[in-house]
Amino acid sequence: MNPSSSIITTNVSIDKIMTDLFNQWGNFLFHTRNVLFPVLIAIVLFLWPPVAIDNIPGVYFMAIGLAMIMIGQSLRILAIGLSYIVRGGRMRRIYAENLVTDGLFSHCRNPLYVGNVLIVMGFVFVSGNLTGIIVGSVAFMVIYRLIVHSEENFLSAKFGEPYAAFCADVPRWIPRFKGLQETIKNYQFDWPKVAVKEYGTIMTSLMVPLGLIAYKLNLANKMDDYQSLLIGLAVLILAAYGFVRFLKKTERLKPMR
């Protein structure tokens, strides 16, 4: 046997084993994400708790975190409002009915996941704990990379050449902003769809940093100065959440398309 052929065969076998392993992990994480992810976030914040707002670096970390949350949530809102992709899975497994390549998906293949990563990283940045920031950011980037790996294999197997062309043209993670303004102009933005599909995530994106900021102010003995404001904001957010949920459940609010 040719030694080089043996090496090639071994490398192919190792690549296949690794691909299958990554697929298994990606599918597992996708399947359990609704329960696992909040638990992981809670664990990170418990093991590396928020630090008091009592220094300039802490304020910078918080500002960066809030900006990341805002950008991440904006990406999700744009993706859903312009051209929603039905990739929420079926029976909690990776599934897609159609290959969506328009709307924000013509600028980034995974805008919803990019938004998720930014939101979660924003939470740990707001906490201000440097170890938590590093561990949490790396952990969730790895988690979403595994999920995307499994999704890409599924989509490649289902859609073949059209999906390969889509991947060759559109970046996986960093959005391509060229032509974005034109894309937005060409769509009637579906605000009702954003409301009914995204109200839970929006509520979480607002309430988690609000709670973290309250905790940090309490550690710095500054809570009394902001207590009324924070409680008012919390009540407003929860009231808006409850109102949109009522409209959705009673079918008074429906997507435009």
Image: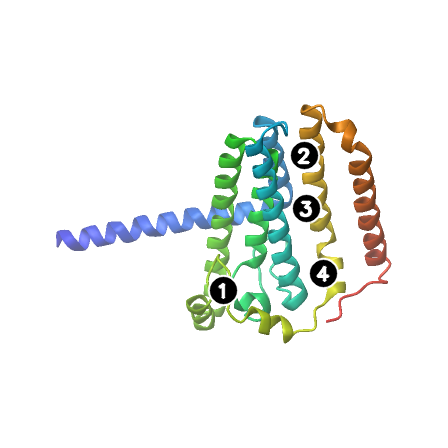
Residue 235, given in percent of the width and then of the height, sits at: 83, 41
Specify the farthest residue to the front.
56
What type is the residue that disc 1 sits on?
Answer: Arg
Compare residues 100 and 183 and report the one nearer the observer. Answer: 183
Residue at x 77% of width, y 33% of height: 226
Q: Is residue 31 left or right of residue 209?
A: left
> Mark 2 vs mark 3: which is more N-terminal?
3
Q: Which residue is mark 1?
A: 176
Eye-nearest disc, 4 or 2 = 2
Q: Quickly name the residue at label 2.
A: 212
Q: Secondary structure at mark 2?
A: helix
**Residue 244 lies in quadrant:** bottom right
36 vs 13, left or right, is right
Which numbered marker is on residue 89? none
Earlier residue among tags 1 and 4: 1
- Residue 213 drawn at (x, y percent): 68, 34
Nearest to the eye among marks 1 and 4: give it: 1
Q: In the image as oriented, which residue stretches furthest toward the bottom? A: 186
Res. 60 in view: yes
Which image quadrant: the C terminus?
A: bottom right
Tell me the distance, in whole angstroms, between the alpha carbons under discs 1 and 4: 22 Å
Q: Please report the residue visible at 49 percent of the width from the left and 60 percent of the height from the top.
A: 154
CA separation, marks 4 and 2?
26 Å
Mark 1 to mark 2 CA distance (whole Å): 32 Å
Amino acid carrying mark 4 in the image: Val
> Is 188 placed above or below 3 here?
below
Q: Amino acid at mark 3?
A: Ser
Q: Position of residue 34 (x, y in %)?
A: 64, 45
